[in-house]
């Protein structure tokens, strides 16, 4: 079982869209996939039409002896399940902090799912917190959407620095450009600059497209209602790269 | 968990959806027509694990699905036809998981289903699917034949994880509906039985129920008959080289036959021995080279795993060479066991096994009770194993370890042949202890033979110019690695032998088999 987390310190960069679309593509190609919506806003949960409710909330979840499998919901798609968000996840940091080895808790919760899933996608809330540190310990890779702007470039460097400080070199960073506006010169420049400094940045990028925003209207992954649009094709390319990197 | 109902003739599919619509929001799906071929291994490994593999053809698309039979849960799937072996399912990570169930066996088509499915989703207030419903009409037949048998239509409720309450509610609605009955058999069982297929109808185990007082010659003939059945079941798969287990089971049946002829020769007329022993010795010889190369190929990944990626890359030509040699030997084997000599041998052997054996020769024990003869023989081999193992020192040559291995193999075969004569708890405990020792002896011998063969392969590859200096160096590294593994197997042997010959096991052997020895001497028999 591989664990990948869509993560960025910044918000509004396309993390949830990436989590939903990549997990849908993973399930479609036959991988038994679980999305865990760790963001209390519950956007991924909303896209899959599931109630954003975990009985007992984050408190019960991190309680000793708790089984995450009891809270999982099937989605409308074969091979694709969801661990819903809950508003109480806003206090997940506090819950984790009350435990011994707080950063190892998420990994421990995921361990019993090994036989059930080939891929777990963690949709993370923005910022660096105890939850995100737990994610770093649990994940094989972070899928990092980056808007090609100067500020995003800065937070990306912070993330590389954080990984190095925490000695997490084994954690793959799968960085891709998101919300790209091909008409903007700045986007082209920043993309070139980042790609030069970090040649490992993925080749596929996701355009800033209204179809992606319409996911909220249809409450569906992009491929299910507009599979042939540019953005859907871009996610397919991104998934091919992510899959290759995860199972290399 | 799926729930299945049989749709009665007088009830239409529309009535099912209409009834559910009274209780749930129903989103109808598009009707689908598709063809499914069910697959399993020759020895039903998927069925035994509660799983199945299907190849689904719909329009232009072909999809392979690996499913849990009871729940319909997808364990893995891929676009394209069913991979013949687990490794063909790569690069998806399920290849490893599937390999844990089917191991080296190939997936073979069992039956074909031609299906028309009407489906619908039952939704909750958020228009989220909470139960899947389908009504399926199926025709079935063997692969290659026209699908002709009609199966009763099936209404299936498929659970969506986390919505078990909704599944129960939908099931209650259908259970109360006239013209629907809960399916007594799973749809898999119905399809197999409609095609005259009986799951688990093959086993390589002896499974011959013996009676203690039965004459030895009769018991020997019955076991030999079972062994020739196993050979016949595996013959075509061995010739076609479908997977390595066909030859494995075929060869084990030949070895067991030779072993039984050797161990129970006093219960077998001399003429039978003269007529057939050379034939089975020949079969043993012609099946050996291919099996040895099969074992090499099966162990290749394990052997090369510790050597690192660069060395493994350099060893790729060696793997190719072994595969080419395997194909050459397989061709020779295929011709040998497709030829007249083989068929004449087996036909004459089956005839010889049908009639009781008798002999006036002195020392013929064919009429003595099986339990007595077998017990005495087993104890004798056990004592030989004790002597051989006890005489081993750190300086003993590999051939002495090999001799112990052969004795243990004979002992194991005899215990398996006559298993049904003894309390299963006792004999299973002894067989388990023996197996632990045999695993170690088997590893030691494999390392010995495979290390020696590496030099032969290196010479052949040098002549064929298929190995460059890097490959030859890598072969040297592999030989050293196998030597190290052989040394650790040898170091482990003492402990395993001590465990096998521990007091409790020795006592068990004597209690279990000495009774028979005594009863034999009480009756004045015993020439072994």
Image (cartoon, coloured by chain):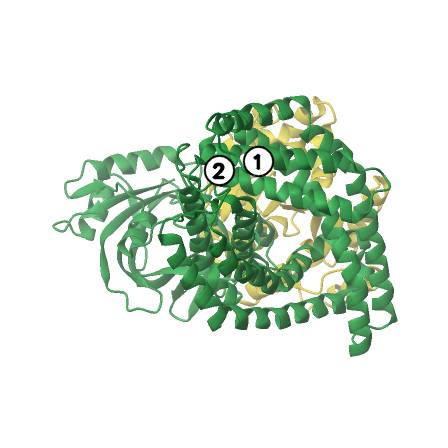
Chain colours: A yellow, B green
Q: Subunit of mark 1?
A: B
Q: Give the quarter of the figure containing the C terminus of chain A.
A: bottom right
Q: Name the side, left or right, on which A118 lies relative to B11.
A: right
Residue annotated with mark 2:
B418
Give residue A245's quadrant in the image.
Answer: bottom right
Nearest the eye: A137 or B447: B447
Q: Is residue A146 visible?
A: no
Q: Name the side, left or right, on which A244 lies relative to A158.
A: left
Q: Give the quarter of the figure containing the N terminus of chain A.
A: top right
Where residue A135 appears, x then y in whole percent? Answer: 69, 39
Mark 2 and mark 1 on one chain? yes
Q: Which mark is residue B338?
A: none
Could you tell me which residue is drawn at 61 percent across and 39 percent down? Answer: A39
Q: Name the side, left or right, on which B493 lies relative to B255.
A: right
Nearest the eye: A141 or A190: A141
Residue annotated with mark 1:
B378
Q: Do the residues bearing badges 2 and 1 touch, measured as CB atoms within 8 Å?
A: yes
The outermost residue toward the bottom is: B464
């Amino acid at each position: 079982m591989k664990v990948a987390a869509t993560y960025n310190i910044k918000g509004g960069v396309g993390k949830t869209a990436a989590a939903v679309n990549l997990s849908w593509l993973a399930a479609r190609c036959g991988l038994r996939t679980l999305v865990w919506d760790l963001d209390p806003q519950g956007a991924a949960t909303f896209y899959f039409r599931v109630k954003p409710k975990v009985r007992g909330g984050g408190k019960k979840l991190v309680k000793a002896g708790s089984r995450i499998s009891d809270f999982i919901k099937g989605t409308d798609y074969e091979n694709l399940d969801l661990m819903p968000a809950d508003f109480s996840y806003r206090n997940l940091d506090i819950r984790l902090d009350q435990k011994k080895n707080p950063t190892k808790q998420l990994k421990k919760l995921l361990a019993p799912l090994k036989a059930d899933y080939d891929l777990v996608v963690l949709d993370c809330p923005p910022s660096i917190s105890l939850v995100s540190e737990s994610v770093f310990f649990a994940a094989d890779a972070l899928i990092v959407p980056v808007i090609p702007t100067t500020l995003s470039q800065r937070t990306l460097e912070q993330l590389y620095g954080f990984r190095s400080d925490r000695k997490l070199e084994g954690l793959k960073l799968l960085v891709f450009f998101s919300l790209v506006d091909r008409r903007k010169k700045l986007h082209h420049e920043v993309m070139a600059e980042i790609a030069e400094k970090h040649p490992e940045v993925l080749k596929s990028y996701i355009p800033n497209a209204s179809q992606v925003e319409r996911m909220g209207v249809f409450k569906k992954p992009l491929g299910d209602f507009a599979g042939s649009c540019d953005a859907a094709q871009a996610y397919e390319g991104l998934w091919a790269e992510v899959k290759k990197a995860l199972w290399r | 968990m799926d729930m299945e109902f049989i749709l009665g003739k007088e009830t239409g599919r529309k009535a099912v959806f209409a009834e559910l619509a009274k209780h749930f929001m129903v989103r109808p799906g598009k009707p689908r027509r598709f063809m499914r071929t069910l697959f399993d291994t020759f020895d039903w490994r998927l069925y035994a694990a509660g799983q199945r593999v299907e190849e689904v053809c719909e329009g232009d698309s072909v999809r392979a699905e690996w499913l849990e039979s009871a729940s319909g849960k997808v364990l893995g799937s891929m676009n394209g036809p069913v991979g013949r072996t687990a490794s063909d399912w790569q690069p998806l990570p399920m290849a490893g998981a599937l390999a844990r169930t089917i191991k080296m066996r190939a997936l073979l088509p069992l039956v074909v289903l031609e299906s028309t499915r009407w489906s619908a989703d039952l939704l909750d207030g958020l228009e989220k699917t909470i139960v899947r419903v389908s009504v399926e009409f199926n025709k079935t037949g063997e692969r290659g034949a026209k699908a002709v048998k009609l199966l009763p239509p099936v209404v299936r409720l498929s659970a969506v994880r986390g919505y078990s309450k909704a599944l129960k509610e939908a099931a209650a609605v259908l259970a109360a509906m006239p013209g629907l009955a809960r399916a007594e058999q799973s749809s898999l069982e119905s399809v197999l039985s409609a095609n005259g297929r009986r799951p688990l109808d093959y086993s390589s185990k002896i499974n011959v129920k013996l009676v203690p007082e039965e004459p030895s010659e009769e018991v020997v003939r019955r076991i030999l008959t079972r062994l020739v059945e196993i050979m016949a079941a595996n013959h075509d798969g061995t010739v076609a080289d479908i997977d390595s287990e066909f030859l494995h089971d075929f060869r084990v049946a030949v070895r067991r036959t030779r072993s039984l002829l050797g161990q129970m020769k006093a219960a077998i007329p001399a003429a039978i021995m003269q007529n057939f022993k050379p034939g089975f010795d020949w079969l043993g010889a012609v099946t050996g080279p291919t099996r040895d190369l099969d074992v090499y190929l099966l162990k290749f990944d394990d052997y090369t795993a510790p050597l690192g990626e660069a060395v493994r890359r350099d060893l790729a030509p060696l793997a190719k060479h072994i595969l080419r040699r395997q194909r050459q030997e397989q061709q020779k084997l295929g011709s040998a066991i497709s030829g007249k000599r083989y068929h004449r041998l087996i036909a004459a052997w089956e005839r010889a096994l049908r009639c009781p054996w008798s002999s006036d020769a002195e020392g013929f024990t064919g009429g003595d009770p099986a339990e007595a003869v077998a017990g005495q023989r087993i104890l004798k081999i056990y004592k030989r194993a004790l002597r051989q193992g006890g005489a081993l020192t750190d300086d003993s040559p590999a051939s002495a370890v090999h001799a112990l291995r052969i004795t243990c193999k004979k002992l194991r075969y005899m215990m398996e042949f006559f298993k049904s004569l003894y309390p299963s708890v006792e004999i299973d405990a002894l067989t388990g202890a023996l197996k632990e020792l045999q695993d170690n002896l088997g590893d030691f011998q494999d390392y010995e033979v495979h290390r020696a063969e590496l030099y032969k392969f290196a010479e052949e590859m040098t002549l064929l110019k298929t190995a460059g200096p890097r490959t030859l160096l890598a072969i040297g590294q592999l030989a050293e690695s196998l030597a190290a593994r052989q040394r650790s197997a040898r170091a482990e042997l003492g402990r395993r032998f001590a465990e096998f010959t521990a007091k409790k096991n020795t006592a068990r052997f004597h209690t279990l088999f000495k009774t028979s020895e005594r009863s034999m001497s009480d009756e004045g028999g015993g020439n072994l």
